[in-house]
Amino acid sequence: MPPQPTPPSTMPKNFNFFHGHRKPTHNRPTARGGLLPNRQTLNPNHNHQHATSNFDLEKWNPEQSVSTPSPRLSPSQHYFAVAQTLSPIARYIVDSFRKHKRWGPPVVAELNKLRRVTPKLVAEVLKVQSDPIISSKFFHWAGKQKGYKHDFASYNAFAYCLNRNNQFRAADQVPELMNMQGKPPTEKQFEILIRMHSDANRGLRVYYVYEKMKKFGVNPRVFLYNRIMDTLVKTNHLDLSLSVYNDFKNDGLIEEGITFMILIKGLCKEGRIEEALKLINQMRKLCKPDVFAYTAMIRILISEQNLNGCLRIWEEMVSDKIQPDAMAYTTLIMGLCKGNRVEKGFEFFKEMKQKRYLIDRNIYGSLIEGFVNEGKVGMACDLLKDLIDSGYRADLLIYNHLIKGLCNMKHVNKAHKLFYVTIEEDLQPNFETINPILLSYAESKKFNEFLKFLEQIQGLGFRVFDDLVKFFSLMVEKKDKILMALEVFDNLKQNGYHNVPIYNILIRALYEIKEVKRAITLFQELKEPDSFTYSNVLSCFIEIGDIHEACTCYNKIKEMSLLPSIDAYVSLVHGLCKIGEIDAAFELVKECLGNSGNTPREFKYTLRIIDICRANDAKKVMDVICEMVEDGCGVDDVICCAVISGMCKYGTIEEGRKVFLLMRECKMVTESDLVVYDDLLVDHMKKKTADLVISGLKFFGLESKLKAKGSNLLPS
């Protein structure tokens, strides 16, 4: 008789551990099994739906890891993402660190609940730690446990943890710690440190670890020697790299091709070609350098603009019977063109043609640009024809160079035709395309053609006014073309091509070449000037001595709730100081310092001079002025007026005169200046004294009596 099945129990079974997913509720968060759940709370207002997402290859990132914090995750969410990768006990330890946030008796008490820790567990915890202090404390606590000894994995994890948290100097001491604890470091531990410093481009730290490695009697392998030398070369420590190479030879190791190439590239970068050639000769005894090695040398020499050394290495490659490939030719030709040796580059270009190499369009572009810069536009046009015959389509940059070259050779009609070729090719020409044509029409004074061309490009969708602003900005950069720009603008504004930015550019340029009256005339034409216009023309009014109009411009800017430019502040302060309005001038100085970031140092010294006048000591004031002169600031009206203002406010006339006498002895002012500043000092002191008397009379209520007597002290 077969055995009967056991009847099902009516009582539910109680399990001690839950494995798998349980249904979440508001009072019971999601649990995913294990000793320590992830404890991720749920939003009670959120409707949970288990949506299945299909795998999308385009969104897949193979480098993404759960240990990498996502920018969208909060710290707690990141912790739970990391915790999922840990074992239960490691998760318990990390969770205790997270709860207490610092090492102390509560953390130690929770750790003591563990029966034992293993080196594997210590390494697992250290791999995810972001606090170097807690990591160090935990590492040393684990080492004190009964029967525990760190292994290489835990030491390595400790070093990685310290370096990851920018404690690389402490990580460098791990080999000493290993040696003290009876675990002499091997080459692997030093390799870890060297790789860390190498990735961070810390060349001197790499050499420091290398020296420590030698003290411990550990000899690097060829691979590690190469890594050390490569890092030292990349961080510009070539001499240290050569000393490491000497140790390499003394250890009896045999070089690899990469060993030679590291040193040769470093020597090429430093321009030590003869030493590089000697190493190439040594390299031939073991392995013959190939075309890729020579191309790498040439590329480094070109980056350092050492074209003679570049040609020397090329000759060495040819004598070594190495056939250069298309990449080697491309690197050399483009480097020669950038170094203004286009004729030499063209010779190598013809060699490529003879060898039937595939010539890149960038080579044509470099040669065309080089020939245009040397004024050989015919050669550049021939190259364009060769480019098109080879089956290439010229890009906009090539056409821009050719248009510029044709305009420089006064062939503006041909440049105009080439411009329409760019339109037909749908290359979307830009300002760099049309600027040479506009400039050529302006220089030849063909203003009708200039206007027609503007109408044409406006019909093609160009933003003409923006381009004109750029055009005039480039023209006025050369002082000899400012008046030409003004003549062009006079013809343009008659046809409606004018705006405020162009006026501002020309007003500023005319002021710089001392054509102040023309600048003011332009300003008077404007109906709605902006703050930049007022700032520019303010300096022009100061130049002709019209302080009243300059102050009007300043007030217009303030009415717009804007600030004048720094140059406008400087001009207005100098103008006010010249007419003796010292108090108003230094109010502007304070305003400029309070509202502007890049203020002139002269303004900062004026306030310091006024403040040092509190001591009423001419020598102390003179010390500040001498310091200012050493700092590169000159002595002008503003500085002298600062002395007058400070002495009239805090000092005496006698000390003020002593300051000017000391300045005369140092040849900072002339005899005539001394007379002028003395009169200003006396007049300003009288004004300050009168102001004090009037303030006192107003305070005591005597103003009405003096008015009745017709006192001259009170203003009418």
Image (cartoon, grey):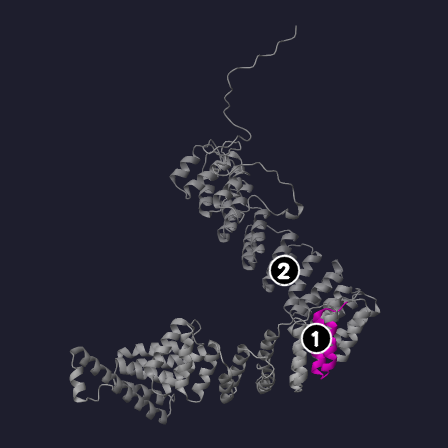
Question: Where 483 sits versus 81, above or below?
Answer: below
Q: Residues within 10 Å of mark 2 (few under 14, many from 20)?
A: few
Picture coordinates of residue 348, whole percent (x, y): 78, 72
Q: Is residue 313 above or below residue 91?
A: below
Q: Which mark is residue 401?
A: 1
Q: Earlier in the sequence, mark 1 or mark 2?
A: 2
> Which quarter shows the N terminus?
top right
Of residue 542 and residue 366, the one placed in the foreground of this image is 542
Task: Tell me the magenta residue range.
Answer: 393-422
Q: Can residue 311 be seen from the camera position used here?
A: no
Quadrant of the snapshot with the C terminus: bottom left
Please tell me whether mark 2 sits on a helix, a strand or a loop.
Answer: helix
Q: Which residue is mark 2?
A: 246
Residue 400, magenta (yes or no): yes
Question: Could you tell me the amino acid type at mark 2?
Answer: Asn
Q: Closest to the observer: 432 or 202?
A: 432
Relative to 533, 361 lies left or right: right
Query: Label 1 neighbourhood size at 10 Å, few (<14), some (14-19), many (20+)?
Result: many
In this rendered view, identify the residue nearer to me: 313 or 403.
Answer: 403
Looking at the rendered structure, the kind of residue marked 1 is: His
